[in-house]
Image (cartoon, coloured by chain):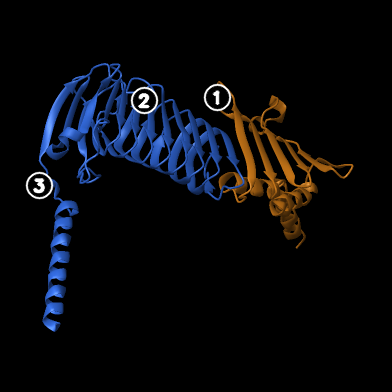
Chain colours: A orange, B blue
Amino acid sequence: MRKLLIVALLLVAGIAESSAQGHIDALMQRELHYPSSKRDVVLRSAVKRDPDTGEIVKRVTELNVRDDKALSQEFVSAFLADCESADTWSCDDKNGKSTDYILVWQNPKRIYSLKRFDDAIIVNIQVIYSQDENTNPKTE
Amino acid sequence: MKKILLLSLLSLIAVVQVSAQRHNHRKGDIKIEDVEYKSVVLSYPETKELLMFIPVDLTIVDGEEGRIEISYPVQEEEYINYGSRDGRKFIIGRDGNKKTPKNTILCDKIPVRMTVSLSNLCRIFSNSNVDIFIGHDSFNNSLYIQNGLAMSINAKSITAAESIKILNSGTFTCKVQQLNTPKLEVVTNDGFTGMWCSTNAKHVSYKSNGIDNISMGVACEDLQIFSRSKGVICFTGTTDQVSLITRRKSTATIALPELNQ
């Protein structure tokens, strides 16, 4: 019985680890592939590749949405939901004008930031796959 | 009195029928095989631009460089004007000095037929109903396609050495399996644009304020979409960079599945 419990706990821990920023990623993938907002949206996504191997070393995605409170709220909820699994996080209220959320995970390094204004949000996601050899999961 | 009334009614009906018949004779469906076509063969090797202001079926083929063959209905001969300007532009349209005939038979079903061999062609401009079939698919420079009314392009592939640019303010449909060029740019769509194709262009940009039905496969480095439009925009394939900007009036359904792989 104990063994079963340990296995179950390990499985849960594994799933939690693999979907560390699952809520934000799912939302961003949805907006990238099937944008839902019919308002002002600027979405940019880019990858940096290793010139020798062609492998992706860094991925940056930025989403800027204006006048879409429902989508803004969805992103804030996703950030709050993924907050617990982050290695470090901060929430900074800029005198009521804006709120900054920053979530960071390591291995690979992932920096997720959300800047929320009254009528707009800016989401920025950076995933660095191989900043140096020690942090590259593929070389581990 | 009754007889007079009856007679006048009958004569009125007869007059209406005759005038209707005449009208039908003038404007009714003229069969394409009944139209007598006259052909002219010209040679303008320096031609780089084609400008069309009347309905044309254009076929671009391999052959002697600069050869332009035109077939037009004999009835329209005196009203059609064509020729080269500056050696670079070939223009076909109505004769500006004469009025357009009231009962013109030129239409999308009875167009002027043009067959050209122009590998240096860099601009196709149309302000009428134009169907283009591209057999010879290789162009040495950039290809700039401008449509003001109705244009459809059919081809297996189009290859342009530098770029393909499209500017549409009418109805434009492009059924080309493969667009081979380093840069593909829909400069602006203010009408309806339908494109069903794939491209190997490294840089793809699509800008629309109109109505779209776009289904395009890409394998590019940079994809830019600006939409203030309606309809469906769907890009599939791979790209390293995506830039998507939608503005307030945009209600287009934009789908970018499987990008950034």
Specify the subunit that label 3 lies on. Answer: B
The kind of residue on which mark 2 rests is Ala
* Residue B90 appears left or right of A104: left
Q: Position of residue B74 (x, y in %)?
A: 12, 37
Density class for disc 3 (Cα within 10 Å; few <14, some 14-19, many ≥20) is few
Density class for disc 2 (Cα within 10 Å; few <14, some 14-19, many ≥20) is many
Q: Secondary structure at mark 2?
A: strand
Residue at 72% x, 57% y: name it. Answer: A8
* Residue B96 appears left or right of B148: left
Residue at 31% x, 29% y: name it. Answer: B51
Viewer-side residue, B54 vs B243: B54
Specify the subunit that label 1 lies on. Answer: A
In the rendered image, the quadrant that contains the C terminus of chain B is top right
Q: Position of residue A139 (x, y in %)?
A: 65, 29
Specify the subunit that label 2 lies on. Answer: B
State which quadrant residue B48 falls in.
Answer: top left
Q: Which residue is mark 1?
A: A53
The kind of residue on which mark 3 rests is Asp
Q: Which residue is mark 2?
A: B160
**Is there one chain holding both mark 1 and mark 3?**
no
Q: Nearer the viewer, mark 2 or mark 3?
A: 3
Q: Which numbered circle lies on residue B34?
A: 3
* CA gap, disc 1 and disc 3: 65 Å
